[in-house]
Amino acid sequence: MATTTTSIGGDGGGEDRVMATAQQILKSLNTPKEVRDDMLLIFSSFDNRLSNITSLVNSGDSKREGDRFEAAEKVILRWDSGQGASRNSLFWEDAPDEAVEYLSAVDDILHWMDELSIQSDSAKIVERAENAIQIAMSRLEDEFRHMLIRNTVPLDAEHLHGSIRRVSLSFASHEGENSDEFESFADVDRGSGIFHERGVSLGDDLRVDLINPDAVDDLKEIVDRMIRSGYERECLNVYISVRRDALDECLVVLGVEKLGIEDIQKIDWKSLDEKMKKWIQAVKVSVRVLLTGEKRLCDYIFSGSDDSEEACFNEIAKGCVRKLLNFAEAIAIGERSVEKLFRILDMYEALAYVLPDLQAMVPDEIVIDEAKGVLSRLGEAAKGTFCEFENAVRSETSKKTMLNAEIHPLARYVMNYLRLLVVYSNTLDELLEGDDDEDSRRIGDDGGLNLELETMSPLARRLFSLIASLESNLERKSKLYADDSLQYIFLMNNIQYIVQKVKDSELGKLLGDRWVRKRRGQVRVYATSYLRASWGRLLSFLKEEGTGGSSNSALKLAALKEKFKNFNAGFEELYRVQTGWKVADPQLREELRISISAKALPAYRAFVGRHGSQIENTRHAGRYIKYSSDDLENYLLDLFEGSACVLNHLRRKSSS
C-alpha cells in the first residue's frame, strides 16, 4: 500500500494518469451531474489530490451545456431566417419532428438560463439567450394564433338541432273563425291553431368540439413554454382574442343579433318572435355547451396557472354573455303586448335555467349581477304583460254580434291563451307571489269562496279573477242581441266553452271542481231561461183559456182552430230561426233538445188529445193539425245546427 502511495506521490505522470482514469470512469458512467458530484466526493476521500478532478469535470459540464445552448440557438435562429422562414408553420402533421426539435430547443435554453451558474464574464451569452427566447416567443405566439384559428371547429347548427329536444305547445282554433272585428285580439288564430314552440331542452351529455382535439396538446405545449418564458400576457391576449371571435361566430350561427331597443321596436311581431325563439335556444346552448366547453379548454390548456385559467375564461365569457344579455334587456324594457307574454316567459325561464351554471363558471361578479338584473327585468316584463292582458279582457268593447250566437272570439282567445299560460304556472306563481290585483282580492260569494281563494296559488287567484272578468264582458255582449232567447243561447255557448276548456286542461286543477260545478249550474239556469223565453209564448197557444167557457160550439171550434193555427205558425217561425242558431257543444245541444221535448211534446199531445177530434171532423182539418207529436219530435232534432231550414209542404192530408 505504501509503495502505491509513493508511486503516486513521486511520479507526476502517474498522478496525471490517475486523474485521467477517474475522469474516464465518470464519463463512461454517463451519470447525472448530482450523482457525479457524489462520486467526486468519494474519490477525494481517498486522496485529497483527487479533489482537483471536480474543477475539471465542472469545466466539462460547462462545455457540454454551452454546446447544447449553441445547438438550441441555432435551431431557433434557423426558423427565424433562411430554411425555417420559408415554412408556414412548425406544427404540421407531415413533419412533427420539427415541432419537437423547436420546443426542445426552447426547453434547453430555458434550462440553461435557469440551472447553469453564470459567471461574471458571461453577460454576452445571457444576452444571446434572452434574444433567442424573444425570437422563439414571437414565433410561438404566431404559431399559437394560427393553430387556434386553423383548428377552431365551426358550430354545426344542424347537428346541434338534432341533439336538442323541443317542447312544443299548441291549442286548436275551432272552425278557424275570422276575428277581424275583434281588433284588440286581432292575432287570435285563424287556421289550424295557435302553435307555440316553448323552447329547447338540452341533454346533460350534449357536448361539441370547439377546437380540433388533435391540436389541444400542441396548444398546451406552446402555452407552457410561453408562460415559463414570462410571456403569459401575450399568450392570454392571443387566446382570448381568437376564442372570443370564435364564440361571436357561434352566436351568429345560433341567430343572435346585436339589436338595441330602437331596433326591437321597428321589427314586426312575427320576425321578433323568431328572434326571441333563437335567443332562447342560444342562451341555453351558449352556457350549457359553449361556455362549459370553453371552461374545460381553458382549464386544460392553462393548467398549472390558476390565475391564467380564471382570467382567460372570464374575458372570453364576458363578451358572449353580454351580447346575450343585451338582447334580453331590450326585450324586457320594450313595448308590452299580450302576444309577447309566452316568449318573454320562455326567455325568463331560459335565463333562470342557465344562471346557476353561469355563476359557477364566471368569477366576474359584475357580469353575474348584470345577468341577475336582466332576469329580474324579464320577470317584471312578464308580470306587466300579464296585467296588460287582464286589462285588455276587462276593457274589450267590440259591438259586433256573433252570427248564430256562436262562441265569441274573445272567449276563444282568452281561454286558449290561459290554457297555454298555465303551463308556466310555477314561474308565474313565483313572479306573482304577493302581487294580487284588487279584483282578485274582491271576488267572493256566499258559499265560502273567499276561504277557497286564500288556499289558491297566486296564479289561480289571478285566473279566477280574469275569467270572472271575461264572463262579465260576455254578459254585456249578450245584451247586443235583441232576442232574449238568443241572448241565453249565446251565454250557454260561451260559458259551456269556458267550462270545457277548464276541464280539459291544467286549469281544472287550479280552479277546482267547485268552480266547474258552479258554472255548469249557470249553464242550466240559462237553459231554463231560454225555454221560458222561447217556448213559453208558443205553448201559451195550447192553454185552455178561451176554449171551454163558451156554450156556442161554433165559437169554440173557431177558437180551437185559431189556437192550432197560431201554434203552427209560431212553431214554423221558431223552427226557421232556431235551426240557424248554433249550439257548438254536442252534449249541450242534445240536452237542450231533450229539455224542449220534455216541455213541448207532452203539452202538444195533451191538447191534441182533448181537441183533435173536434178539428178532424171538420173540412180542411189538415190546415190546423199539421203535425203529429212524432213530427214535432223529429223536427226538434234540426234545431241549433247552424243552418236555417224552412218547413214547406209538410201539411198532413185533410181527413175530409
Image (spheres, grey):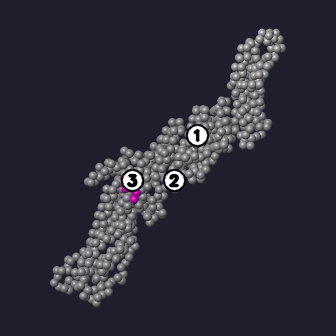
Residue depicted at x 72% and y 18%: 40
Between circles 2 and 3, the one closer to the viewer is 2
> Does 493 sit left or right of 282 as displayed?
left
Is residue 262 visible to us here?
no
**Disc ID at residue 390:** 3
Residue type at the position of mark 3 = Glu
Is residue 509 on the magenta stretch? yes
Residue depicted at x 82% and y 12%: 12
Q: Earlier in the sequence, mark 2 or mark 1?
A: 2
Residue depicted at x 70% and y 22%: 35
Residue type at the position of mark 1 = Arg
Q: Where's residue 167, x and y in %?
A: 49, 53
Between circles 1 and 3, the one closer to the viewer is 1
Residue type at the position of mark 2 = Arg
Q: Where's residue 416, x and y in %?
A: 42, 58
Q: Report the residue marked by disc 2.
A: 166
Q: Secondary structure at mark 3?
A: helix
Q: Where's residue 301, x and y in %?
A: 62, 37
Q: Residues within 10 Å of mark 3 (few under 14, many from 20)?
A: many
Is residue 484 on the magenta stretch? no
Distance from the alpha carbon under mark 1 to that under mark 3? 47 Å
Q: Residues within 10 Å of mark 1 (few under 14, many from 20)?
A: few
Query: What is the quadrant of the C terminus in the image?
Result: bottom left
- Span of residues in magenta: 504-510
**Disc ID at residue 296:** 1
Q: Is residue 451 above or below residue 626?
A: above
Residue depicted at x 80% and y 14%: 15
> Does 463 sit left or right of 281 as displayed?
left
Q: Secondary structure at mark 2?
A: strand
Q: Secondary structure at mark 1?
A: helix
